[in-house]
Image: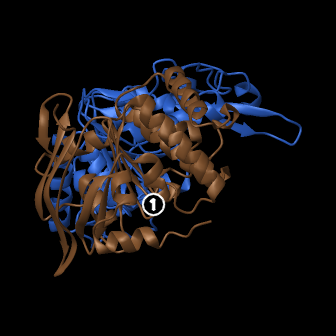
Amino acid sequence: MSEYNFAYLDEQTKRMIRRAILKGLAVPGYQVPFASREMPMPYGWGTGGVQVSAATLTPEDTFKVIDQGADDTTNAVSIRKFFENTADVETTEETEKATVIQTRHRIPEAKLTEDQILVYQVPIPEPLRFLEPRETETRKMHSLEEYGLMHVKLYEDISQHGAISTSYAYPVKVSDRYVMDPSPIPKFDNPKLEMDAIQLFGAGREQRIYAVPPHTKVVSLDFEDYPFEATKADHPCDLCGAEDSYLDEVIMDDAGNRMFVCSDTDYCRSRRAAGHVGRLAEEGAA
Amino acid sequence: MTPLLQVKRIEKRYGARIGCADVSFDLYPGEVMGIVGESGSGKSTLLNCLAGHLEPDAGQIIFDTRADGPVDTVTMSEPERRMLGRTDWAFVHQHARDGLRMSVSAGGNIGERLMAVGDCHYGDIRDKAIDWLDRVEIDEGRVDDRPTAFSGGMQQRLQIARNLVTGPRLVFMDEPTGGLDVSVQARLLDLLRGLVREMGLSAIIVTHDLAVVRLLADRLMVMKDGRVVEAGLTDQVLDDPQHAYTQLLVSSVLQV
């Protein structure tokens, strides 16, 4: 254990963040401003998520970090180490064992339970930002529930591409009130936003926290004649054979060979441990 | 008949200076009112007060709403006022860039107001957008082009289409023909006159171009230093100006 206060942040800061989290849970989808602290990592690397995790963790928690579904990428490894050092909490790569999961741009494939908290890293919390650059105006639009502009974006998608081409950070309406950016998760994950676990969203640079309480209605925006579709690569996982998980495409060589693998590494690993085998798994082992 | 809009002693000050003061008039359904005056006479201030963009310091603006009859828009809640701004009112800016979303296609621009009032059927929205492009004489093949690719006159017509798509009853226009060359102006005026008559719109047009009001407006108000100096039927005011300033204004028009 290092000389840091538990989970790096001082107690006053954690109280301030917890107040923002509680407010966010009380008003699902509403972006609560908070006094984001400078963290020992650059903006864009999850400073918001880390602060929310720090305020949420208790010494008894088991912590898991994923980056695009993977436990073993730089971002995930360094944030996990950060809390191992500063909070001395148990860490795990297994989704079921974790009590707090910090995620960048994915929701784990395994169904989360009421005992778990999912913390998202959010780059830009404002779903209307690219259509309306003025913060004063977007706040007013949220408070007056003027969300026509969000559909303009989807309209533009269809008119240009023939279908809603927004494939990540797909806007949702939470509890029939606030339109929310679910962070850049693939729209494949959108239906999972209605879950049993608590979902907290932290944006460090933009200084916003918002939340979706368990069992809250979350609807992806769409048109009557162009309904929302959760899409993924039309392929089974080449390592574990899963047909229901979100896949990453990996280019193998310059001759057009490629493979599709689960982006959720823990899900893929546990399936392989249970004996599921994909198209390329045996060659890979050999 | 109930007036569509009753303006009672509207006043707007910028500190000690007067923006506009003591302006009162009634506007009846289907009527077009022109407001003329030199720059700095308070025309635009008045228009922005009427349209809810500025908060007047005194006075009442009573609009005959569809649901609740005459309501004072100055004291009504902001969501209600903004709702009016999206449905029953339209505002045509002098510069089309102020009234359009330049990074959104023409169809999206027209559809925005429809989507803002809860329309969420893509096919319907697109059909209406194409219909309106046709009505403002823009080729329907340009529905997916951005306004940045349009000429000034087309942008202005697109702005008009975008505003009229929800079937408003009152249109505010701030120098709708400013900055356009004369032949484009003439076509735009033709178009506006057609739409106003066809849809039975009421309109308030602010301009410094007397020819525009001669063509479009039924009634005319002349403003100077924030106050109305003369008001009456357009032809009457232009042909027989009573106030010294109106006489000056009418005599300053260049004859071709």
Residue topped by disc 1: B210
Compared to residue A186, the image places residue B123 above or below, namely above
Q: Is residue B239 left or right of residue B102?
A: left
Q: From this viewpoint, is residue B62 visible?
A: yes
Q: Amino acid at mark 1?
A: Leu
Quadrant in the rendering for residue B56: bottom left
Residue A165 falls in image quadrant = top right
Label 1 Cα neighbours within 10 Å, binned few <14 / some 14-19 / many ≥20: some
Residue sitting nearer the eye, B146 or A146? B146
Q: Is residue A163 left or right of residue A29?
A: right
Image coordinates of residue A147 in percent, x first then y, are: 35, 39
Which chain appears brown? B
Name the quadrant of the C terminus of chain B. Answer: bottom right
Left or right placement of residue A285 versus residue A175 in this view: right
SS under mark 1: helix
* Chain identifier of the blue chain: A
Chain label for disc 1:
B
Q: Residue at x 28, y 45 (%)?
A: A142
Q: Tell me the residue at 50%/35% (across/down).
A: B194
Q: Quadrant of the N terminus of chain B?
A: top left
**Residue B60 placed where, x, y %?**
11, 53
Visible residue check, residue A106: no
On the image, the x and y values in percent for residue B135 come to: 56, 32
- Name the side, left or right, on which A93 lies relative to B105: left
Q: Is residue A193 above or below residue A134?
A: above
Q: Which residue is nearer to you in this view: B153 or A221?
A: B153
